[in-house]
Amino acid sequence: MYEKNYPKKRYSKTLSFLQKHISKSSTILDLGVANPFTVIMQDTGYSVENTAGEDLDLDFASVLNSDAEVVTAFEIFEHLVAPFNVLTKIKADKLVASIPLKLWFSAAYKSKTDPWDRHYHEFEDWQFDWLLEKAGWKIKDRAKWTHPVNKIGLRPLLRKFTPRYYIVYAERRPNTQK
């Protein structure tokens, strides 16, 4: 199911969490361009459409025009300057979102080759929870997992024990903006 270079642990944990909360009969809008995990969701039986790569800090058209029952956002909010804005525009009543957690022993991610591939935010779990709550979401379930790397050193050792990824299932609170 996964190609050799896919992040197997992250993808299997994400898929398992998604399957726990979202039925395959639900339609999904996945924030971000189609990617290897989109294919995994589709191969597993989910009906998924992606946004087109627009700047979700400024352009909400794909979110506003979607009739999907569920929005997924896997490692996307850390790339936005103001994720609160798009979170308040989502029309769906269900959200499954994951983020990389801020690591005290590592600086925020910034690609050396791609000027758009960087993390504006790296959240602590409580910060992400607060963001979702302020945007009108109620968290129903959450999970964390580590991201060990096969290298030698203090940071790789810390990665074996320090959670790197955080995922939540949330539902829109009644009487909040859509």
Image (tube, rainbow, N blue to C red):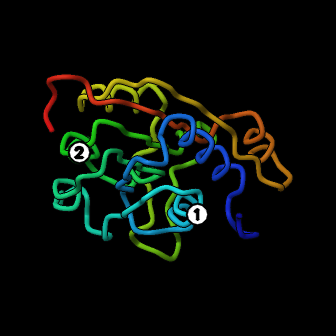
Dot 2: what SS? Answer: loop
Seen at 68% across and 58% down, the residue is 7
Few, some or many C-alpha atoms within 10 Å of disc 1 (few <14, some 14-19, many ≥20)?
Answer: few
Q: Position of residue 167 (x, y in %)?
A: 52, 37
Seen at 21% across and 44% down, the residue is 91
Seen at 47% across and 51% down, the residue is 74
Q: Position of residue 98 (x, y in %)?
A: 49, 43
In the rendering, which numbered label is found on residue 90? Answer: 2
Label 2 vs label 1: CA separation? Answer: 25 Å
Q: Position of residue 173 (x, y in %)?
A: 25, 24
* Res 128 → quadrant: top left
In the rendering, which numbered label is found on residue 43? Answer: 1
Amino acid at dot 2 = Ile
Seen at 83% across and 55% down, the residue is 150
Few, some or many C-alpha atoms within 10 Å of disc 2 (few <14, some 14-19, many ≥20)?
Answer: many
Q: Nearer the viewer, residue 47 or 129?
A: 47
User: In the picture provided, is 145 more to the left or to the right than 176?
Assistant: right
User: In the picture provided, is 158 more to the left or to the right than 89?
Assistant: right
Count of picture labels: 2
Amino acid at dot 1 = Asp
Residue furthest bottom in the image: 113
Quadrant of image for the N terminus = bottom right
Residue furthest right in the image: 152
- Name the N-terminal-most of marks 2 and 1: 1
Q: Confirm or deny contact between disc 2 and disc 1 (CB under 8 A).
A: no
Q: Nearer the viewer, residue 106 or 14?
A: 14
Dot 1: what SS? Answer: helix
In the rendering, which numbered label is found on residue 171? Answer: none
Q: Is residue 64 above or below residue 34?
A: above
Q: Nearer the viewer, residue 48 or 139?
A: 48
Q: Is residue 154 above or below residue 20?
A: below
